Image: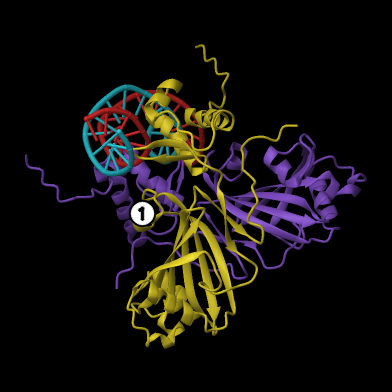
Chain colours: A yellow, B purple, C cyan, D red
DNA sequence: GAGTGGTCTAGACCACGGT
DNA sequence: CCGTGGTCTAGACCACTCT
C-alpha cells in the first residue's frame, strides 16, 4: 500500500523547531527581548506545548534563551567568559580572585571528598562557602573543604563561623607552600541550595570544577565550584575574551 | 476547608524520584545492570511515564545511567577522566595525544570561526577532523580549523583529502613555533553528525572545548572539540586519575 | 515480532512574579 | 488578580534492537 516514504529519516519536530527558532533568534531578535509565551508559540507552530518546551529547553541549555517562571522567556546575552585557570598555581583567597567568602562551618564532608582528602570517615573538616560574581551576576558557588590538619593554628580565632572565619581559614591556608594543583570539569545538576544561590531551578545544568590543592605531600584542600552552565564559558589561559559561538550546522563553502 | 498543608514547599515528584533512584543505584545496583523498563518503573512509583522520564533524564545527564533505544536503561560506570590540558603547550598532533586523524577537507568555516582566525569572509580553511578514544570508546570529535596561511608548504601533498592529508596538515603546522594557546569549556548540545559519531542522540549534552593556537603573532589554528558530557570528566593538570563524585545533598555531621 | 526508549498530544493544575 | 513558566497525567504512535 502506498508507502510514500520520501522522508527516510524524519527529523523530530522539536529538533526542527529548535533550528527554526535559532535562526529567528539570530535574525529577528535582540538581546533581552521577550518572546511570545509558550502557549502562543506552540499554537503558532502548530505543536503541543510540551513539544515546544523541548525545543526551548535545548535553547536555554545552549545559553540562547533565559526563562523565568512568572515572567517569561527572553533572549539571553552571549555567554560570559569566566577565568578559571591561569598558568600559575595559587591558593584560593590569594590575590584578588573574584571569589567572595560567604560563610564557614565545620562538619563531616561527603564520603567522596573525605576519600580525596584522606581524612578518616566521620572526621570533620572546615567547609568554606564562597561565591563568585561576574558582570553583576552570581555565576558560581564554591565549597572549599579544608582538613583541620591544614590549618593547625586556627585556634586563636574567635569567630566560630561567618565570613570572618572563612577569611581566617583562607589566610591560614596560605601559610603553606603550594606544591601543585589539578582540576577537573564535568557536567552536573544544581543541588537545591546551589540552585537557589544561582537563581536557577533545582536540577539546572551546571559545570562542576573540582580543584585539588597539594601541600606538604598531601591534598591540603579541595574545592568544588559550581558554575551556571547556561551563562558561563570557562576559560583556561590568559585571554578570557574569546568568543567562539558554537553555532550549529554550517560548513558550507 | 481542610487545607492541611504541612508541605509548605512541595518537592516536585520527579525530583524526589531522582533522589530515591540515586540511593537505589548506590546501594542496590552494580555497574552495567539493567533497570526495569520505563513503563514498569513508572507504575511501580505510581507516576506517569513522562514524570519518571524526567528523573531518568537527569540521572543520565549526571552520568549515572545510560539509556539506549531498543535496548534498555543500564547503570553507567563512573565517568572517565580525560586529560585535556597539560601544563606545556603543544601543537595538535604532536607527541601521542590520543587523537586520531579521520579526514580533512577545505571549505569556508562558520562566521564565528572565521572571525577568530581573522580570515576573510568566504575564505576557505583546512578542516581536519579527528576523534578521540578512551577506554575503548569514542569520547570526543574535533574540528581543527587551519587557515591556508598557516600551512603554506602544503602544495606538494598529493592526497586531496582523507587521513593522509589530515596528517600532512598537522605535520606542516608543527613547523611553526607555538607561541601560546588558550582554552575555553562550555556546555553545548551535539550536532547531528557529532551525535552519530559519539553514539548519542542529536541534542545530547556535550562539553565543547575551544582551543586557540598562536604562532607568528596570529591565531594559527583553532580547535573545537566535542566531548560526551555524560561519560567524560575533563581533567586539567597532571593527574587524570581523580575521582570526586559530585554526590548531592550531604553535609551532615 | 516483541520489547525497549524516543516523540508527541491535549489537556490539567501549581508556583511564582508582577499589577 | 492575571499571566507566566513548571509540573504532571494518560494516553498514542514511532524508531530502534534483539531474537
Quarter of the image holding residue B184? bottom right
- Mark 1: which secondary structure? helix
Residue at the spot x=35%, y=79% of the render? A123
Horizontal side, residue A27 vs residue A132: left or right: right
Q: Residue at x 73, y 41 (%)?
A: B114
- The answer to which image quadrant residue A36 occupies is top left
B14 and B159: which is toward the camera? B14
* Residue that numbered label 1 is attached to: A196
B241 lies left or right of B172: left
Give the image location of residue B186, x and y in percent: 56, 51
Work out which residue is located at the far left of the displayed protein and give it. Answer: B1
Q: Is residue B37 visible?
A: no
Question: How far across and how far down the image is residue A156, in percent?
Answer: 37, 88
- Residue A89 at what x, y percent from top left? 60, 72
Q: Residue at x 58, y 67 (%)?
A: B240
Mark 1 burial class by Cα count in 10 Å: few <14, some 14-19, many 20+:
few
Amino acid at each position: 500500500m502506498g508507502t510514500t516514504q520520501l522522508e527516510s529519516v524524519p527529523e523530530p519536530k522539536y529538533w526542527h523547531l529548535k533550528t527554526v527558532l535559532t535562526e529567528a533568534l539570530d535574525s529577528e531578535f535582540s538581546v533581552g527581548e521577550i518572546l511570545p509565551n509558550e502557549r502562543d508559540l506552540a499554537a503558532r507552530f502548530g505543536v503541543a506545548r510540551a513539544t515546544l518546551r523541548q525545543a526551548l529547553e535545548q535553547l536555554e541549555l545552549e545559553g540562547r534563551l533565559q526563562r523565568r517562571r512568572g515572567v517569561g522567556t527572553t533572549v539571553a546575552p552571549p555567554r560570559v567568559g569566566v577565568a578559571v585557570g591561569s598558568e600559575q598555581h595559587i591558593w584560593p583567597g590569594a590575590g584578588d580572585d573574584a571569589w567572595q567568602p560567604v560563610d564557614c562551618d565545620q562538619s563531616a564532608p561527603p564520603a567522596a571528598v573525605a576519600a580525596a582528602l584522606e581524612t578518616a570517615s566521620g572526621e570533620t573538616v572546615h567547609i568554606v562557602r564562597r561565591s563568585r560574581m561576574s558582570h553583576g551576576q552570581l555565576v558560581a558557588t564554591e565549597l572549599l573543604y579544608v582538613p583541620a590538619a591544614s590549618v593547625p593554628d586556627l585556634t586563636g580565632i574567635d569567630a566560630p563561623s561567618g565570613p570572618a572565619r572563612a577569611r581566617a581559614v583562607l589566610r591560614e591556608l596560605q601559610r603553606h607552600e603550594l606544591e601543585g594543583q589539578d582540576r577537573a570539569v564535568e557536567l552536573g545538576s544544581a543541588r537545591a541550595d546551589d540552585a537557589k544561590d544561582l537563581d536557577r531551578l533545582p536540577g539546572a545544568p551546571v559545570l562542576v570544577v573540582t580543584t585539588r590543592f597539594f601541600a606538604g605531600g598531601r591534598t591540603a584542600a579541595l574545592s568544588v565550584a559550581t558554575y551556571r552552565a547556561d551563562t558561563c564559558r570557562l576559560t583556561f589561559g590568559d585571554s578570557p575574551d574569546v568568543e567562539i559561538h558554537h553555532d550549529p550546522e554550517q560548513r558550507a563553502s
